[in-house]
Image (cartoon, helix red, strand yellow):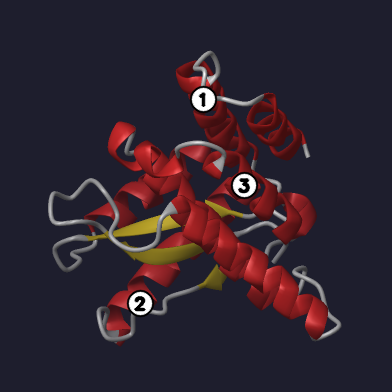
Amino acid sequence: EHFQHYAVSIRDDILNEEQVDLLSDLVRRRADARWRGDYEEADVYRSKVDQVPLPEGFKVIIQDVSRKEGGGSTWELIQLAGDGNIMEGQTVLQLAHSALGLAMAASREGSSVSNEEKKQSLRFLVEQAKERLKQDKKVRNELRGRKAADAAFWFAIAGSTDESLFEMLTEVCYNELERFGSKHSCRAKDIWQIVERISG
């Protein structure tokens, strides 16, 4: 096989072994189809993943791994809020801080975030952050001031290269600069810190 597949589920108390095996098989088949360039077949398997019965309030997230990193896909079970839209749990800034913690732990151990287990954890944190950012204003309100810039900076230090995550965080930063950049309470130092972090 020309690709690697990593099935990740830390929700052993939520999914039974049969569900984990089924999801792992479907994600593996989807990754194989993508590797061969058969995107129609890959979409069929993606639909089958979405049809697997899950407990209410949970969703499967699939993260594709680039060919240069071995190809394949990872998957994780995430919990949604009661309305089915906004994820419960950590804020985007907290997720970024957790990603930074991964990099710091790797540094202390003398390894790097390229360790496969840590890469999986980082990808999962990135996917959670992106899911939260898709929830628009209610979640983006947790990123007032320079928090979005801090989150982008921490994810970058942790080793993330996910362009869509950084685009989302840059958009939040831009909106924040528009929102308070012309106010008397906004100092040049505040603007500089946001620009410096988001461009880092």
Label 1 sits on residue: 185
> What is the x, y in percent for residue 187?
62, 26
Please state which amino acid type lies under the numbered disc 3.
Answer: Asp
Q: Nearer the viewer, residue 156 or 63?
A: 156
User: Is 126 positioned to the left or the right of 9 in the image?
Assistant: right
Query: Alpha-carbon distance for marks 1 and 2?
Result: 52 Å
Q: Nearer the viewer, residue 155 or 183?
A: 183
- Mark closest to the chain's N terminus, 3 or 1: 3
Residue at the image point whose x is 32% and y is 39% from the top? 135
> What is the x, y in percent for residue 102?
66, 72
Label 2 sits on residue: 20
Judge whether 87 appears above or below 85 on screen: below
Judge whether 120 appears above or below 134 on screen: below
Please state which amino acid type lies under the numbered disc 1.
Answer: Ser
Quarter that holds the N terminus: bottom right
Label 3 sits on residue: 150
- Mark closest to the chain's N terminus, 1 or 2: 2
Q: Give SS at disc 1.
A: loop
Q: Farthest residue toward the front? A: 184
Q: Nearer the viewer, mark 2 or mark 3?
A: 3
Residue at the image point whose x is 70% and y is 36% from the top? 193
Query: Alpha-carbon distance for marks 2 and 3?
Result: 35 Å
Query: Alpha-carbon distance for marks 3 and 1?
Result: 20 Å
Q: Farthest residue toward the right? A: 110
